[in-house]
Amino acid sequence: MTGAKLMLLDSASLYFRAFFGVPDQRKDPAEPPTNAIRGFLDMVASLITTHQPTHFVACWDNDWRPQFRVDAIPTYKAHRLVDGSLAEEESPEDLTPQVPVIRDILRALGLPRLGADGFEADDVIGTLTARHKAEMAVDVVTGDRDLFQLVDDAGPVRVIYTARGGVRDPDLVDEAFLRTKYAVASGAAYADMAVLRGDTSDGLPGVAGIGEKTAAKLIEKYGSLVALRAAVDGGDPEIKGAQRTRLEAGAAYLDVAPKVVQVAPDAPVPSVDMSLPTEVADPVLMSRVASEFGVTSSINRVLAALRIE
């Protein structure tokens, strides 16, 4: 499909950013909050206008802390749990009621929103990328470094990384970016490095004493985490001293960490028409939400980006 481009949104990443980045303009605290709604829609309008996708999916966390990852590493995202809960993610009080409104607006506009039960949005993104990168370019929009593992110049698959400059001035992450920033050659190598390094924001301990630079050097030298572990187990004399001790001590962690870090390429994501809509899917719903929440201007910006009159 020559010229086709699929844009995949890490939706929660964007609406959390919108909530914290867009001022709450309410004059009466009894009114419903709308800053995340407005910010999210403005981001979508900007992304579509700037990057011109032909296909689009807002990817959703049906399960933000999947059981298969918790079974592998119980600390996975544990620090984000609401006190006393084993499943509920801590979320700002004024953000929670805005998320269903974002869902309604996406449905009204005809922009597909996809999740998979038992899986995170990252897995939805990984699955759709694996499914479609042979037929179209893929842009992954996120503020989460975990998805750098999908970068693949041959795809092409790149990440529009919003953590620093937002959607208006993002880092465009390709293999050259990974080499320059992290000294790894590919998305797969980034994932291997991330396993070794760990990630405290996700509750992943990593191998004690192996930081990012050392992890990158080991993956560069041996080519992959599997090859590195084979060298450790095989008694490679170049792996010695404290480094060998640390890698051997981390063996149990390394047995399970890849299944936590690597996004699923085969989650049960339904197949839908991902083409950008050419007309509003539900005008009545869109009009009701626009009026009730006072977000007509933001909706109109998305409609303009979609060239829907």
Image (cartoon, rainbow, N blue to C red):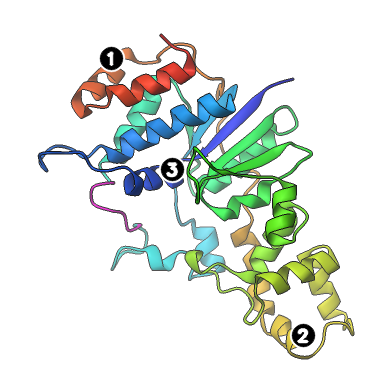
- Identify the element where label 1 is drawn: helix
Q: CA distance from mark 2 to mark 1?
A: 64 Å
Question: Which amino acid type is shown beneath numbered disc 3?
Answer: Leu
Residue 117 locus on image (x, y percent): 48, 44
Whether residue 124 is situated above or below residue 287 in the rendered picture: below
Choose between 74 and 156: the one closer to the eye: 156
The span shown in magenta is 89-95
Q: CA distance from mark 1 to mark 3?
A: 26 Å
Residue highlighted by disc 2: 244
Rendered-image quadrant of the N terminus: top right
Q: Nearer the viewer, mark 2 or mark 3?
A: 3
Residue 179 locus on image (x, y percent): 75, 55
Give neighbour class at mark 1: few <14, some 14-19, many 20+ (Cα, 10 Å): few
Circle nearer the N terminus (2, 3): 3
- Identify the element where label 2 is drawn: helix
Q: Residue at x 39, y 31 (%)?
A: 42
Q: CA distance from mark 2 to mark 3?
A: 41 Å
Q: Residue at x 58, y 24 (%)?
A: 52
Residue highlighted by disc 3: 14
Circle nearer the N terminus (1, 3): 3
Whether residue 90 appears in this view of the structure is yes
- Identify the element where label 3 is drawn: helix
Choose between 233 and 309: the one closer to the eye: 309
- Let me know if residue 93 is in the magenta part: yes
Question: Which amino acid type is shown beneath numbered disc 1?
Answer: Val
Where residue 159 sits, quadrant-wise, is top right
